[in-house]
Amino acid sequence: GQIVHLEDYRPTDFVLERVDLTFELDPTETKVEARMIFHRREGVSPSAPLVLDGDELKMTGLLLDQEELPAALYEATDDTLTIRGLPETAPFEITVTTVLSPETNTKLMGLYRTSDVYCTQCEAEGFRRITYFPDRPDVLAVYTVNIIADKATAPLLLSNGNYLGGADMGDGRHFASWFDPHPKPSYLFALVAGDLGVVEDTFTTVSGREVALRIYVEHGKEPRAAYAMDALKRSMKWDEEAFGREYDLDIFMIVAVSDFNMGAMENKGLNIFNDKYVLADPETATDADYANIEAIIAHEYFHNWTGNRITCRDWFQLCLKEGLTVYRDHEFSADMRSRTVKRIAEVRHLKSEQFPEDAGPLAHPVRPTKYREINNFYTTTVYEKGSEVTRMIATILGRDLFKKGMDLYFERHDGQAVTIEDFVACFEAASGRDLTQFSLWYHQAGTPLVTASGSYDADKQTYTLSLEQTIPPTPGQSAKKPMHIPLRLGLLLQDGSEAIPTAISGADVTADVVHLTERKQTVTFSGIPSRPVPSFNRDFSAPINLHVEQSAEDRALIARHEVDLFARWQALNTMALDNLVKAAAEARSAQPVTCDGALVDGLLAAAAEEELEPAFRSQVLSLPSEADIAREIGSDNDPDAIHAGRQAMLAAIAAAGRDTFALLVDKMSLSGPFRPDAESAGRRALRNAALSYLVYADDRPEKAANAFRAANNMTDLSHALTLLAHRFPDTDETVEALAVFKKRFADNALVIDKWFAIQATIPGAATLDRIRTLMSDPLFNASNPNRVRALVGTFAFANATGFNRADGEGYRFLAHQILDIDARNPQLAARILTSMRSWRSLEKVRADHARGALEEIARASNLSADVSDIVDRMLK
Ligand code: HT7
Ligand code: ZN
């Protein structure tokens, strides 16, 4: 594929006025007729041709104003259709007929089949796999869609917008017509046809309009869509209250399918979901599943305004809709659940996924300036860092001005395809602030590092902080400018109260936000009665790394007294991480692993503190992951040493806290029917965290096996199975539990995915053989993305010791899998391959094996653009 550059953006030569699509559905010979009305844009040369995008299309007809086009006037290549001799000013109609084979479309882009249902996925460039079209997000048009299909196998015919009507055609077929009055880009087009069950409800908008809500699922699964429906109604209400956004069609539909490349898709009025993010009941879904469903239903619904009504001018602006919509779904979940616990989960995710991306060969700015394959830019940088950038705008402006800026954005740009500059300009206009320096967050890749040191002058009663920011070099960007970093800061006194300075110099400060704008800055706080303990980056106000020498006692003071609960968790987590890094070094040099007493005391005190909510306490008990430790160490990583050090620390904490944990297991047990609410989930999380420590402290599997037998919901059951499999992989108890679980849930694909994933994460070199065996299990299905992600993806992303075997077999296994998957589904292959993004930070032997495996992929013939883009960037 060719490289696309932001600076080459030009509007199209022709304006698309409207689109009429007719689909005659057939598994291998679907006929698509696309009628498009265009006119030449003012000022465009009369000789300029119309160039439409295509991808693997078979065209069977081409008309201009209903007359066949002479062959001399057009040229069709692999990816374009060029038409010449078009009218100078008058509108004209182009009719393209194509024939598609949805059944054999294994890329799951364009029109495809999943469990006998026809469905589409058009973002980013899937529409061009349906017909020749100006397939770019700045081409907005009004669509009418006619669907003709066999009535018996496809009684349900859906598309975007409002239903116009339909009828029986008398020949075993029927048709339906849909009209979407809102101009939209092609990536938001959707069609679904098949035989599905439905859950129905209604929502009355703030202005009193009734909207029909429908969630379509496989027959028999309707009861499992109840939670998704509830989440949808809460999302609709929340968007009215929090952002003043009302829904704009008579109907909102969600369809759940089992073969899907990503989580879900926000097609106008017809969201299509990976069924993993719709279906839930206590027997089959964990608390994490419920929380994900709530968040993703909300996310896709929120796109109706941030993405659909206001869309992206080009794909470089992807964060305009994704970063903002993630920010909105984060705020929604924070309002529905515990704000602090939600923030902790967000920061954990950001640090474990986005920070490594930003520190490795795939690093790119939130708003990139070039790409080879746009599918590879649906990244955690665009989504999660993009959300953090939006959050920082809210922090800098404050709640009211942020809201004013958002209102202006909706008012100014409704119905348009816009840029990040347009978005930022709304906040500048609303606040009168210059956000030029702030905008570097969109343009400079890499996680800024802030180094801080403080000194207290008892005579003058001043406290001085020296702060320095550095932004590491990233691919294509060696020198960086200093950024505007809004750093929330607390100064705690020894009694735990907060110092209120009488004056501050050296930086702009609003409330507790210190605005860092220089490379080096010295900030002085006056009127500080005694040496304070600084609590940096409260609420994780900026997505940065922070280096500060702080004693365990000072961190413990923050952990006990901070008013910002996030900062309390952060203090304990940082203490734990420091200790885990030391433990890894000790394990690597075969020394005994030491566990800091202040850390153990802090963890156990927080775990037992009844004033704190259980979900928070469970977060405290969950130590940084092996990947977190590797990231903190940064280079020359030995995953086995990291694992050994961490296990030793777990054992030490488990031994010291045996009584606390036993008490918690008792106290946190729940009676009565299962409820998926945040509070009940928090109790289960704390109970299971405590149970994990009890199991670590034990060398026999009974406790875990008993928990497995006693579990009456999927959260507890899968947790117990994980404990058994990870801690006692080859015991009779584990073998039996795995067999029981498999038999009980054999006909539930989403639960069987968990069965595969749990085994894929068993630590140690032996797991690779297990993976190979599991791949020949009859339940393994190489063409179902969820199943491939559950086994191969989970192994590569989440099993540090198994995947990074010292002999390099894990990497070679993955290389072969990537080539195999790539032949069917390039998007899926490229995504799983990113699991190797941190290969350069491994110790030399492993890094050499990893490079060898990547080179093997790079050498393969017929690589997709998706995989070759990723592998080339990783090897650069
Ligand atoms: N906007 C969507 C992103 C997307 C996607 C979804 C499913 C399959 C392929 C896809 N390519 C891009 C999902 C979202 O962020 O809401
Ligand atoms: Zn999105």
Image (cartoon, grey):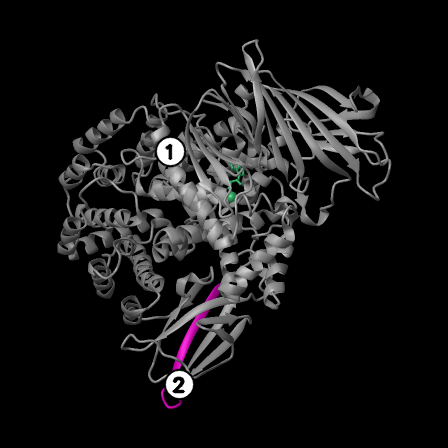
The residue at the point 83 percent across, 34 percent down is 90
Q: Is residue 138 above or below residue 861?
A: below
Please give the range of residues in magenta.
Answer: 448-462
* 329 on left or right of 183: left
Looking at the picture, tell me which residue is in the foreground, 614 or 178: 178
The quarter of the picture where residue 63 lies is top right
Secondary structure found at label 1: helix
Residue to which mark 2 is pinned: 527
Q: What amino acid type is highlighted by mark number 1?
A: Ala
How crowded is the residue under tag 2: few (<14 C-alpha within 10 Å), some, or many (20+)?
A: some
Task: Point out the image quarter for the N terminus.
Answer: top right
Mark 1 or mark 2: name the one nearer the start of the chain. 1
Secondary structure found at label 2: loop
Looking at the picture, tell me which residue is in the foreground, 211 or 519: 211
Residue to which mark 1 is pinned: 225
Q: Is residue 813 above or below residue 681?
A: above
- Give yes or no for residue 375 being in the magenta stretch: no
Q: Is residue 485 visible?
A: yes
